Image (tube, grey):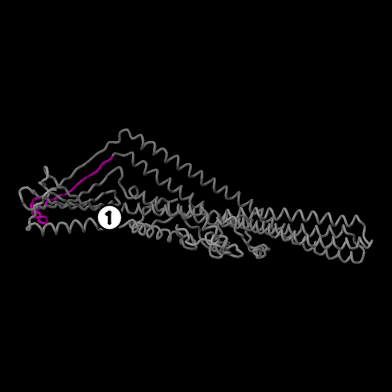
Amino acid sequence: MPRLRRSATARPTRVLAAAFLLSVGLSGCYTPAQQLVNADSESYAILEKRRAELDAKGGFTIQPPPDSLRQRMLAGEKPGALGLVRVLEVAAENSRDYQRRKEDLYLAALDLTLERFAFAAQRSGQLSALLSGTGDEAQAASAGGGFAVRRLLGTGAALIGDVGLSLARNLSSGDGWDVASDMGIRVTQPLLRGFGRRIVLEPLTQAERNVVYAARTFERFRRTFGVDVTQRYLRILQQALQLKNEEENLANLEQVSKRNEALSRAGRLSEVQLAQAQQDELRSQARVIDQRQRLQTSLDNFKLFLGLPITAPLELDLTEVERLDSGEGLQVNEQVATSFALDQRLDFLTVLDQVADAERKVPIAANRLLAGVEVTSGINASSEPGKPFDYDADGFTWDLGLNVNLPIDLISQRNAYRETLITLERAKRAEVELADSIRVALRDELRQATALLETLRIQANAVTLAERRIESTRLNQQAGRAETRDILEAQEALRQANNALISARVDYHLARLNLWRDMELLRVDESGVRPDPELLLADANSAPSSAEPTTDSAEPAPEESKQ
């Protein structure tokens, strides 16, 4: 074992030095769990502000719920009839795609925290110790530590300050510890390439804008996802209601068959009319069996989509269809719909901003083709031997330098500059293409909504007429003026009319949802997926707003390009 010789006179110095190095080394150190808390705190604060600007409702977290409906159903819970609002919640908490989208948004905010850190005071520290000797005897010991702070300024200047403390001792001679310290400050300022606030802050600017884009993308996805879930849900309700209609029709046909059978035994009805009723009853039974099978398949697929146990029973609230608006609801013309969509569509606003991004990057890429000229300066000082906190004013050293990197063979930078020009043209074309696509989609959806509204009115009238026909045919049958075929045809007409009315109500509601979604008029909140008509009024009364996102950082906001 190495033999260490201790010196009582050096103990206070060692204690002081150790305390200094330990305090420096541990300042700003966090456990992995604390680091996660800090990352979440910063990222969620960014997202809360950005989502509030989009009028996004509800909290945001990437942590899965601790007690999801799937887990409770696997434990034996029976949730009862699920309404549309609850289905939307279940779909959001179990959808893998939904979770991935949330994580994408979180990662964009996490990237922004790193870019903000680049312009904050960055601290670093290190500790070291060394023991050396020959054979089994230690001859020398040394220890040291250093602490540095680096700060990047908006002009591109890098400011670095550092302080260090070192201890050394010759153990073989029994001398005490030699303690010394040093400190220095160094500044590097680019003059051509890399100079200027707009260029230096570009990574931060883009990171800020990327969070805005990610927040828009996520909110747009939430609304589209809500429409998708609603469509799947209502289509299953449509099948369930049509099955109910088929079962009621079958019950009516069974009554007709029983009546005709009794009349046939009494000799008051021909075998032909009895066979007609029985054939219609058998066809109705086949339809009921087929409808039940298709409904069960749809329910299994829906449970798979929701992430619920396939074997668990799932009950849906059939009254949701009855609560759908059967009237005209919120109606807009093509000019209003197109104008509103181009002003509010989140994906279109992002495309507009990406044109501004591409424009901003052209002069930045051109700047990288300039010569690299840097002015450097620094000042350093070392303490008196054995006096770590005693500095001689005449012992300070300084330097001032100039570094020039000539713009020779900048092929990579040249190509990058050309790519930015191409990217700009592509961004402009993407803007025009998406605007035209929005116009085409809205024109088609307006036509569909108009046609389906008319279809809904027609089918509602058809049901009324079919019910009157049933009543009239039964009265005529009682009076002996109607045959079995008349009853069966009237019953079939009512069945078809009821099924068509259910389809028309669902089709019209979904057509309006698609229209409102593509107008960016939908909102997703605790009440479900709904249009917000007040947005139309607010848009009509306000001047067109800039689509350009804002920035939010500890540094002054980077200068933005005008669109």
Badge 1 density bin: few <14, some 14–19, many ≥20, Cα 10 Å: some
The residue lying at 71 percent from left, 58 percent from top is 243
Closer to the camera, 14 or 197? 14
In this image, 95 relative to 32: left or right?
Answer: right
Instruction: From the top left corner, tell me how far across and down residue 543 is, in percent.
Output: 50, 60
SS type, badge 1: loop
Closer to the camera, 111 or 304? 304
Q: Tell me if residue 413 comes above or below residue 309 in the rendering.
A: above
The residue lying at 31 percent from left, 51 percent from top is 118
In this image, 349 relative to 189: left or right?
Answer: right
Closer to the camera, 142 or 502? 142
The residue lying at 36 percent from left, 49 percent from top is 203
Q: Which residue is label 1 attached to? A: 121
In this image, 177 relative to 479: left or right?
Answer: left
Residue extending farthest to the right is 267
Count of marks, rendered view: 1
Instruction: From the top left corner, tell me how far across and down residue 487 is, in percent.
Output: 85, 60
Instruction: From the top left corner, tell me how far across and down residue 94 is, in percent.
Output: 52, 56
Q: Tell me if residue 34 comes above or below residue 429 in the rendering.
A: below
Give the main secondary structure, helix, strand or loop, of the magenta stretch: strand
In this image, 499 relative to 71: left or right?
Answer: right
Can residue 377 be seen from the camera position used here? Answer: yes
Can residue 465 be seen from the camera position used here? Answer: no
Instruction: From the top left corner, tell me how far across and down residue 486 is, in percent.
Output: 87, 59
Q: Tell me if residue 390 comes above or below residue 79 in the rendering.
A: above
Magenta stretch holds residue 505? no
Q: Quadrant of residue 134?
A: top left
- Kind of residue indicated by mark 1: Ala
Range of magenta residues: 372-395
Magenta stretch holds residue 379? yes
